[in-house]
Image (cartoon, rainbow, N blue to C red):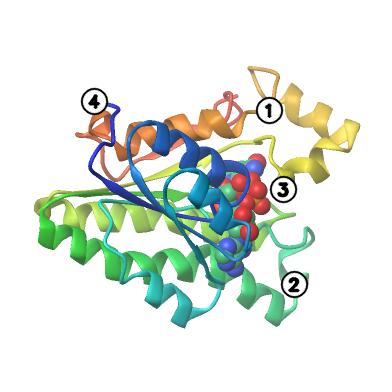
């Protein structure tokens, strides 16, 4: 049930962190990969996994639309940025627009092309990387939280619209995961301690643990699951 043989998976933001872990796990499960990232390293990473790399800035609408012409049975919209921490309304307009472009416009534009193509072929699975920050109030990363909350709704909308054609759509909401991006928090012992005390499992998660959730949702193992947001956070949200 967890195999992906014969399926092509398009993963965005696969040059590092969670996206890279997803690419590796999906390759091991038998998927053919199309990996997109603005980091040119994506070409070598994809080649090593037997797939194809696409260097693209997914904050750019035209480059997202071009990627949308790829045929894939599985789509993982993972590329995203947190943006600078600080009061929500203190963010300047240019920074805010850039944040919304990569975190929200890219999944909207990409699914607008890929979901109908999946529906025409009668099957597909879409996984969107949301966040714990989109499931509860967050003053320091406010706009980030808004974009991530919107992705959970995008998954629900896609699930309802394309479900009758055999396409599933879900989101994953990770808590704090040990990636480059979390290193700012993890390099500050006090902030790390605060996070760990607020997390029943008393540790940060690994990119592999998020990738395992993505494999469940992308594969037939999650075949009757759609419109959901799977929280992978060591219990932070419920405590
Ligand atoms: P990361 O920074 O390690 O990886 C993000 C990848 O996206 C990078 O390879 C980067 O080059 C790529 N990317 C960023 N902007 C891009 C653009 N404009 N065009 C193309 N590629 C671009 O981050 P990560 O921690 O692996 O996070 C992956 C996803 O998971 C993000 O959407 C993030 O919001 C989400 N998330 C992460 C955490 C965490 O604690 N690490 C928690 C919750 C949610």
**Residue 66 spot, x, y in % from top left:** 39, 76
**Front-lying residue, 123 or 88:** 123
Disc 1 CB within 8 Å of nearest ligand 1 atom: yes
Going from the N terminus, do you reach mark 1 or mark 3 first? 3
Residue position for label 3: 181
Residue 202 appears in the rendering: yes
User: Could you tell whether 94 is left or right of 169 in the image?
Assistant: right
Label 4, label 2: how far apart the Cα atoms are: 45 Å
Q: Say which element carries label 3.
A: helix
Q: Say which element carries label 4.
A: loop
Residue 133 appears in the rendering: no
Label 1, label 3: how far apart the Cα atoms are: 13 Å
Q: Quadrant of the C terminus?
A: top right
The label shown at residue 88 is: none
Q: Residue furthest top?
A: 201
Label 1, label 2: how far apart the Cα atoms are: 28 Å
Disc 3 CB within 8 Å of nearest ligand 1 atom: yes
Going from the N terminus, do you reach mark 3 or mark 4 first? 4
- Tell me which residue sits at (66%, 59%) in the image: 142
- Tell me which residue sits at (75%, 54%) in the image: 140
Mark 1–mark 4 CB contact (< 8 Å): no
Disc 4 CB within 8 Å of nearest ligand 1 atom: no
Residue position for label 2: 91
Residue position for label 4: 1
Residue position for label 1: 204
């Amino acid at each position: 049930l967890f195999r992906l043989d014969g399926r092509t998976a398009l993963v965005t933001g696969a040059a590092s962190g969670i996206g890279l872990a997803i690419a590796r796990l999906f390759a091991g499960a038998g998927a053919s990969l199309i990996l997109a990232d603005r980091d040119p390293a994506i070409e070598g990473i994809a080649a090593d996994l037997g797939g194809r790399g696409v260097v693209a800035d997914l904050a750019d609408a035209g480059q997202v639309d071009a990627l949308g012409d790829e045929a894939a049975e599985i789509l993982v919209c993972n590329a995203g940025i947190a943006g600078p921490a600080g009061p929500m309304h203190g963010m300047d307009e240019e920074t805010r627009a850039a944040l919304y472009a990569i975190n929200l416009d890219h999944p909207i534009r990409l699914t607008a092309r890929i979901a109908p193509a999946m529906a025409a072929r009668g099957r597909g699975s879409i996984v969107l990387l949301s966040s714990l920050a989109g499931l509860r109030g967050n003053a320091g990363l406010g706009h980030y939280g808004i974009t991530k909350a919107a992705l959970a709704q995008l998954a629900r909308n896609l699930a309802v619209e394309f479900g009758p054609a055999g396409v599933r759509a879900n989101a994953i909401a990770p808590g704090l995961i040990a990636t480059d991006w979390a290193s700012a928090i993890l390099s500050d012992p006090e902030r790390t301690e605060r996070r760990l005390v607020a997390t029943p499992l008393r540790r940060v998660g690994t990119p592999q643990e998020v990738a395992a959730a993505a494999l469940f949702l992308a594969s037939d193992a999650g075949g009757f699951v759609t419109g959901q947001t799977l929280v992978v956070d060591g219990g932070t949200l419920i405590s």
